[in-house]
Amino acid sequence: MSDTKIHTVTIVGAGLVGSLLSIYLVRRGYKVTMYERRPDMRQFSISAGKSINLALSDRGWKGLEGVGIAEDIRKVAIPMYGRMMHGTNGALTFQPYGEKNQAIYAASRGLLNCEMMNLAEKNGVKIFFNHRCTHIDLDHARAKFELHETGKETIVESDLVFGADGAFSAARLQMQVATDRFEYSQHYIDHSYKELLIPAGPSGTFLMEKNALHIWPRGGYMLIALPNLDGSFTCTLFLPVSGKESFHAIQNDQDCRDFFTRVFPDTFHLMPDLLHDFFANPTGSLVTIKCFPWCYKQKLALIGDAAHAIIPFYGQGMNCGFEDCTVLDGIMDEMKDDWSKILPAYQAARKENADAIAQLAYENFIEMRDKVGDPSFLLRKKIEAHIHRKHPTKWLPLYSQVTFSNIPYSLALKNGYNQDRIMDRIMEVRGIESKWDSKEVEDMILSQI
Amino acid sequence: MSDTKIHTVTIVGAGLVGSLLSIYLVRRGYKVTMYERRPDMRQFSISAGKSINLALSDRGWKGLEGVGIAEDIRKVAIPMYGRMMHGTNGALTFQPYGEKNQAIYAASRGLLNCEMMNLAEKNGVKIFFNHRCTHIDLDHARAKFELHETGKETIVESDLVFGADGAFSAARLQMQVATDRFEYSQHYIDHSYKELLIPAGPSGTFLMEKNALHIWPRGGYMLIALPNLDGSFTCTLFLPVSGKESFHAIQNDQDCRDFFTRVFPDTFHLMPDLLHDFFANPTGSLVTIKCFPWCYKQKLALIGDAAHAIIPFYGQGMNCGFEDCTVLDGIMDEMKDDWSKILPAYQAARKENADAIAQLAYENFIEMRDKVGDPSFLLRKKIEAHIHRKHPTKWLPLYSQVTFSNIPYSLALKNGYNQDRIMDRIMEVRGIESKWDSKEVEDMILSQI
């Protein structure tokens, strides 16, 4: 066997990214085995009331298209054409995400994961569940797993290990503790989150607009809701951990009732189980993880959240992980089977883009929380959309670059900063409110691009 | 036993900070046991050619004074009254660190550590060597150690565990993997280091000025040398890991000889074993570690490098760790035995100061590397020293605040920024070179303080 070739691959983690990666690899003829810490979700329901609904966008679809399951998934995904903002007074404002037919798609994490595991197995991937990775001998790509039921340890040898085991990756921990000069940071934002539910109305009707991502922006915190196929909405409350308005400040039913009726009055009556759910569901933390390198020799590579966990506010966590897979797939084409080149090229291609989407996600958190209710912000978005419609090749709004294109995230971030500088000047134009769609404003923008 | 009281303490790590802490604690009547990963350095020489010599300054002395061993150590420490800069042409420039009698003191890490372990044992601390910490059950302050020779595991129960186990702390790792919302980062600078030696001259004579810290600043890299009691100097080369002038670029004897004769010509003939030492001694990495919180309930606390490893360019790593001990000691006085208050107060008092010295160390790295050879920089320091002499209460140079005072690091950092702004303006005064000690310049400075 040549030094630069591999035949057998171990994937740690059978989540969304691990499963997709396994399909890409097995189709190229690699022998792929996947080890998952949790039980098989196709047999056991493991909902912990802790999920944030997924929104599939272009990069995610591209990943699914590459293995031919995009159409199946599209049938069970709900297009959301824009943000529906809920004011404190109950007023609704709809802001399209892109052009008329552009949408992000609400999808069930569980369903998507199950579909991909089925497809992986159909293609020959072997999956072991209840196997927790406890150690990786990096120099020998030798992974140790502990079997949940018995505590028995198994050692798995292969040519290459992929760590697709999420934000708290055991594979990455080995990089941290066993290699020199490993850059690493984990940073939590002040906000945590909690899953809540707006159930379906009679006969599975949707009690709010179905084809939108609902947001209740409230400055220091916010609530969002995404539609489910059964007519319900999965809601996520993002709230500071401590402080005046915080999870810490809501200690009992009365606190919870007061808070919701005061700041989300139009949702309170839509959530009959609010008080139960609020205290029964866990409060989840929101972490950004950055590290480098992502690879150790030709023996270990990190992918998805294991390499670059981000906060969920651009809806790009899974989409970015899927793009890791399609980019890696393209590099495998280019470099043939030479893994001494594939892995360095993969991390070089992805690291700056992962850093960029982490930054964008953070900035979008601020935007969703503080600005989407702001008239000046809405006008700004309207001007951008107007210029984009008239000059689609010259002005693509940042949100569209991230969501409806495959432009590298790092380039989108840069373009976004340039657009921001232009729009800052435009918004200072006297009387912009009345002449936002004038030729004068249009020419000003075009001259600055 | 009250919830807020503790009786038994386990310290992980018998290095400088762990040993000093053990003495402070045992003298207050706590039962203290210390576990060290390495063998007993009093019986086995464990020099790995990887040490950076210590420079004790005021905060370090204060720590030693608190347990009564400062005078013993002072006898075996060598005062360094300033920096001796070596130009490429061999020219020497001496720059005092502070006032006439102010010095930092070169001391042997090994000797200092041995003395403190002796004192700890004399006071009743029990020390176990060859015990590597493999796990801590945080909620029960239950630490697991693996004995080096046999691999046998011991579980140690106590009321409180201190992690004093350095930059790659096993105790901190437990905080990282087992607690929610733990902030953590490890960041390596581009430079690594290597220990080298200038041996003593005939009959133990010093071949360079004894009472100075020698620096060969060269822009992108530097060499430093600190005196030892036997007439030798321990040198440390700080050099980028890769690039044109780097560790990577020095692959063989010829490369090494060429590099030293070109950039450190006056040292080459002073280092007869240079070629051997360069390739035999390991290349060490330089990491900054930040984390928060430093404590878990009343069960675990981090101290010294385990909580805040910094790069060595302000000579404050050990001094800061010793200050952790004296500050904690003061808080114990204040809070009596109420550990529910002691630990939160300790981390609140130290975190911002640890962050500040990390920042100062980084800035001093830039200063030592790039500026200490620069005439404008030397003039600036001369003006500061002049103003300080005339107005000692109004102007204390940043270096003195950090080194010759117990002003909190965070305050020193802030003062330093203010002084920098003033000095930036002064250095722009036309003809400052000739009138640096004029009444006009003095008044300008005083008016801005």
Image (tube, coloured by chain):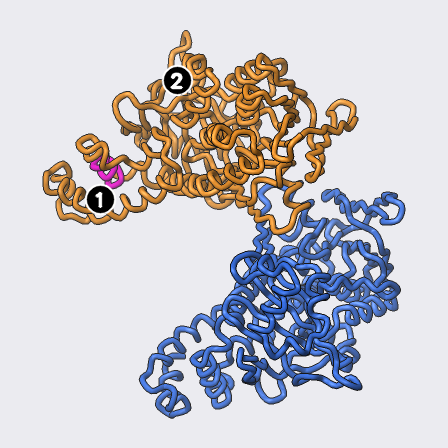
Chain colours: A blue, B orange
- To which residue does mark 2 refer? B78
Q: From the top left corner, tell me how far across and down residue B168 is, in percent.
A: 60, 36
Q: Quadrant of the C terminus of chain B?
A: top left
Q: Are marks 1 and 2 on the same chain?
A: yes
Left or right of A322? Residue A371 is left
In the rendered structure, the answer to whether residue A171 lies left or right of residue B87 reads right
Q: Residue at position x 37%, y 81% from top?
A: A426
Mark toward the start of the polypeptide (1 vs 2): 2
Disc 2, SS: strand
Amino acid at pointer 1 = Ile
Overall secondary structure of the magenta section: helix
Is residue A432 in view? yes
Q: Which sits in the foreground, B222 or A426?
A: A426
Within the image, what quadrant is residue A85 found in? bottom right
Residue B358 against residue A318 in the figure, above or below: above
Is residue B430 inside the magenta stretch?
no
Check the image and report above or below for A89 versus B163: below
Residue B326 image label: none
Q: Which residue is the site of mark 1?
A: B449
Where are the magenta residues, as a range?
Answer: B376-385
| Residue B383, position as x, y percentages in the image | 20, 37
